[in-house]
C-alpha cells in the first residue's frame, strides 16, 4: 500500500497513464459515480470490519448505503453519483452529485482521473471519476438518497479473498463481488472499486466491463 503522503500523486499518475475505455451510450442513459479518496477519520461502523491493532487514521474510500425509500437499488452499497444532465461532462456530474448527496463541495482541481465506462443491466453507462477529498469534514448525507456514509480504509479492498467470482447466467461472464467486513458489495459498485484497486493502488491495467451483476442488482 502506498504511503498516505504519496498516495494522491501516485494515483493521479497511474490514472493519467491508464488508457481509459469509453462506451457509446446508444439507448442507455448516462451516469457518473465518484471514487472519493479521503482521510479515514472515525467513519461509520460496518459489521465485521475491525480496525487493526495500533490503529491510526489512513486513506479511505467514501461509500454509502442507499436510502430505503429509493425506487431502485434501495439499501444497497453505492458510490456517490447519478445521472449526467444535458450539457454536463462526467466530471461535472460527479462533483455535483457528490455535493448533492454528501454535502461535499470539490472542484476540478480535485479530480485525479477516470476509469473505464461500465454498462449496467439496468440500462446505464456509468463513468467513474476519481477525486481527492482530503479530510472531507462535515459530511451531511442527503436523507432522500443516502441512509449512511462510511469511510472504508483502502487496505480493506486489498484483501487476498477479493474479488469473489461466481458463474453468471450469461455464458462467458462471471458475477463479481468484493468482500467488505463480514458482508460484500455487488457489481457495478464492486466492479468500479475493483478496477480502482487494480489500476490506482496496485498499478495493474485491469478491465472489468466483462464482469456481471447479481440478479438483485440488475433492476
Image (spheres, helix red, strand yellow):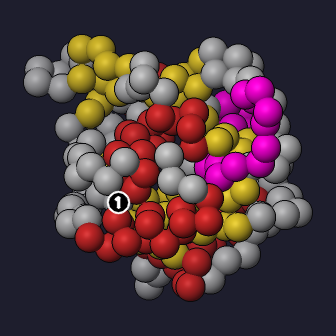
Question: For the point 50% across and 46% down, which residue is it?
Answer: 1
Question: For the point 77% across and 64% down, which residue is it?
Answer: 135
Q: Is 53 a magenta residue?
A: yes
Residue 165 higher or lower than 66, as above or below: above
Place of residue 121 in the rendered image (x, y in percent of width and height, measured from the top left): 33, 38
Image quadrant containing the C terminus: top left
Residue 87 higher or lower than 159, as above or below: below
Place of residue 192 in the rendered image (x, y in percent of width and height, measured from the top left): 41, 46
Question: For the point 55% across and 84% down, which residue is it?
Answer: 108
Q: Is residue 115 left or right of residue 141?
A: left
In-front residue for pair 33/195 = 195
Q: In this view, does 115 lie to the left or right of 157?
A: left
Q: Does any portion of residue 201 appear in the rendered image?
A: yes
Q: Give the range drawn in magenta.
A: 51-75
Hey, which quadrant is residue 14 in on the image? Answer: bottom left
Q: In this view, does 65 lie to the left or right of 44?
A: left
Q: Mark 1 points at which residue?
A: 115
Amino acid at each position: 500500500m502506498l504511503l498516505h503522503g504519496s498516495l494522491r500523486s501516485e494515483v493521479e499518475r497511474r490514472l493519467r497513464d491508464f488508457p481509459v475505455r469509453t462506451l457509446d451510450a446508444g439507448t442507455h442513459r448516462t451516469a457518473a459515480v465518484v471514487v472519493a479518496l479521503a482521510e479515514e477519520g472515525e467513519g461509520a461502523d460496518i459489521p465485521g470490519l475491525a480496525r487493526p491493532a495500533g490503529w491510526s487514521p489512513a486513506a479511505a474510500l467514501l461509500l454509502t448505503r442507499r436510502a430505503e425509500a429509493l425506487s431502485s437499488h434501495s439499501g444497497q452499497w453505492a458510490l456517490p453519483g447519478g445521472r449526467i444532465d444535458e450539457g454536463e461532462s462526467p466530471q461535472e456530474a460527479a462533483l455535483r452529485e457528490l455535493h448533492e448527496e454528501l454535502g461535499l463541495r470539490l472542484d476540478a482541481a480535485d479530480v485525479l482521473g477516470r476509469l473505464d465506462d461500465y454498462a449496467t443491466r439496468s440500462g446505464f453507462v456509468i463513468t467513474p471519476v476519481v477525486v481527492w477529498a482530503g479530510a472531507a469534514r462535515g459530511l451531511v448525507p442527503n436523507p432522500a438518497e443516502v441512509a449512511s456514509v462510511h469511510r472504508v480504509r483502502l487496505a480493506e479492498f486489498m484483501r487476498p479473498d477479493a474479488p469473489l467470482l461466481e458463474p453468471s447466467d450469461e455464458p462467458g461472464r462471471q458475477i463479481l463481488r468484493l468482500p467488505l467486513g463480514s458482508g460484500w458489495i455487488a457489481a457495478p459498485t464492486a466492479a468500479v472499486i475493483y478496477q480502482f484497486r487494480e489500476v490506482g493502488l496496485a498499478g495493474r491495467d485491469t478491465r472489468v466491463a466483462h464482469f456481471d451483476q447479481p440478479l438483485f442488482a440488475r433492476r
